[in-house]
Image (cartoon, helix red, strand yellow):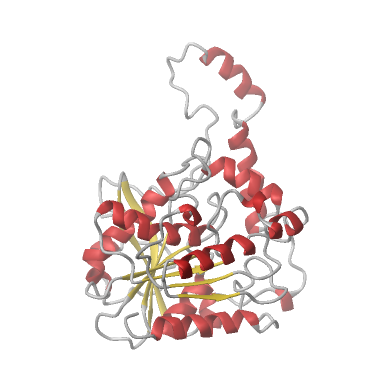
Amino acid sequence: MAATEQGAEPSDPHIDTSLLAIPDGSGDVTAVRPIDGLSFVTTDDPAMPSYRVIANNRRPVALRDLMIAPVRSGYIGDSHARPDPALTPRSGAEAVPGVRSTVVYLPVRDGVARARVYRPVGLEGPHPVVLYVHGGGFTVGSCDDTDYITRRIARDAQVVVVSTDYRLAPEHPFPTPLDDVADVYEWLCTSAGALGGRTDVGVVAAGDSAGSNFAAALPLVAARRGLRAPRAVVMLGAFVDFAQERWDSFQRLAPRGIVYDSAFFGFIRSAYLPTTAWDDPLASPLEADLTGYPPTFLTAGTHDPIVDSAKAFAERLASASVEVEGYWPEGMPHGYYFFPDVQSPEGDIVFDLLRDFLARPGR
């Protein structure tokens, strides 16, 4: 077995130790690797001499690969100094003490996916599981980025949260990232006990932004695979539609949006759906038959360009007789729930609402 991650917290004793390392002969398919400009070209390709000339003058060779580098470096702020300590948020562990985080590797097709398991200290015995999927426009990010959110959900709702990575576009377009998430979900349906979770009550599907898109698609994938449906769906920054140009909020807010704008949306759409129709229900759950859909909690701020599509999804759920709760805080942008210690109260309000939603009978 490979060694566990360096610098990790002491592992949760409720977790099967075989999941703490990458199995011999396998690999973490979710690890982002440097892009080789010729990695998708076979060595016997008759045009290889020309490609080598291009690669000698620019790397990566493909424009999609060239464009992703600044997107990823900008997302994590590699080039920006942070001069004001007062505006540097506390870590998730500092903001939400009393929650243990353990890195595990869960089986998916082609290998394993890195994930973090969150469990409140002192929470004994098997408990319900929330599968959480991070955002990042399908192209960036990891489960480390949502550490505050996932610790908060685990503590507030007294549940086990499994926060998973997945392969990223453009290297891995639709449906591979969704398949990774669905594979983890399928494993949890029968094997959550290996993480100290319950398998008898079903798994909650949750996520933010792009991750909320996966969470929204999971009930549809579960039906296709013949799996038990998620017992509930949670969507922060609810993203349910790739045809955003039809919505008034996108027309008004996206051109000069903060965090989320039309330029970013255009890039991630072409990266994630290079050949897939935008109205495919697994990419745009707004277009799905929502009959029998699980109870759903979703939120988007009124200054989020995708808020109109999120509200439309809530309305279609209600029309399909699905229990749905929406929270639309005035003036809030995309990702308003992301950081601790922000003076706007809406970030705390949404976690209180989510806690109460998950505490309802049958949840």
User: Which of the 4 quarters of the picture holds residue 133?
Assistant: bottom left
Camera-nearest residue between 64 and 24: 64
User: Which of the 4 quarters of the picture holds residue 206?
Assistant: bottom left
Q: Judge from the rendering whether residue 15 lies leftward or rightward of residue 269; answer left or right.
A: left
Camera-nearest residue between 191 and 244: 244
- Provide residue 232's location: percent of width, then percent of height: 38, 72
The answer to whether any part of residue 348 appears in the image is yes
Q: Quadrant of the N terminus?
A: bottom left
Q: Residue furthest top?
A: 46
- Provide residue 31's location: percent of width, then percent of height: 44, 50
Q: Quadrant of the C terminus?
A: bottom left
Q: Judge from the rendering whether residue 66 lies leftward or rightward of residue 159; answer left or right.
A: right
Q: Residue furthest bottom?
A: 122
The residue under the point 63% across, 21% down is 54
User: Which of the 4 quarters of the picture holds residue 267?
Assistant: top right
The residue under the point 64% across, 39% down is 67
Camera-nearest residue between 144 and 214: 214
Placement of 235 over or under 169, stated as above or below: below
Q: How many marks?
A: 0
- Provide residue 6's location: percent of width, then percent of height: 42, 63
The answer to whether any part of residue 142 appears in the image is no
